[in-house]
Amino acid sequence: MALALRNPSRDPLLETYEPLLGRLHRICDQFQIVFLNRQIEACKHLLHQDKLIHVGVLGQFKAGESSFLNSLIGKPLPPVGVIPVTTTITRLQCGKRERAIIRFF
């Protein structure tokens, strides 16, 4: 599954990411966690880009990827079931209205 996130600088609700990254950076400095510096700087850079950010969500069968995405987006969009139900590549993207596009290759 992939989740495509739009640039947060265009969404006022997501403007909190920059202060959160600053707080995370200060916490890492305080506890001398230097291995996260590159990732934090990359996230700060991405906040100012006008591009989609692609996030891959991978796991073994029935590991909870769909449940995780549903929790993240706040809606039950990818199906969840007792047997594997999302055995194909699924791409979610933010938009003004809900819709589904199915492509067969």
Image: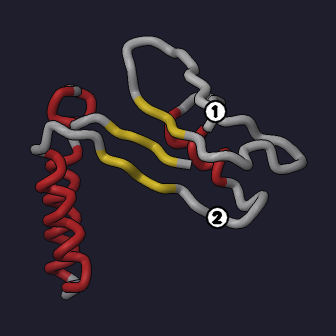
Query: Which kind of residue does numbered mark 1 sit on?
Result: Phe
- Location of residue 94 in the rendering, given as x and y in whole percent from the top left corner: 40, 27
Q: Are marks 1 and 2 in contact (CB under 8 Å)?
A: no
- Location of residue 32 in the rendering, given as x and y in whole percent from the top left corner: 19, 87
Residue farthest top in this picture:
97
Please state the total of marks drawn on the protein image: 2
Mark 1 or mark 2, which has the lower sequence index? 2
Residue position marked by numbered label 2 in the rendering: 59
Residue position marked by numbered label 1 in the rendering: 104
When asked about the image quadrant of residue 49, the answer is: top left
When asked about the image quadrant of residue 7, the answer is: top left
Residue shown at the point (64%, 64%) measured from the top left: 59
- Location of residue 48 in the rendering, given as x and y in whole percent from the top left corner: 10, 44
- Quarter of the image for the C terminus: give it: top right
Query: Which kind of residue does numbered mark 2 sit on?
Result: Gly
Residue farthest front in this picture:
105
Residue 105 lies left or right of residue 23; in this view the side is: right
Residue shown at the point (15%, 48%) measured from the top left: 18
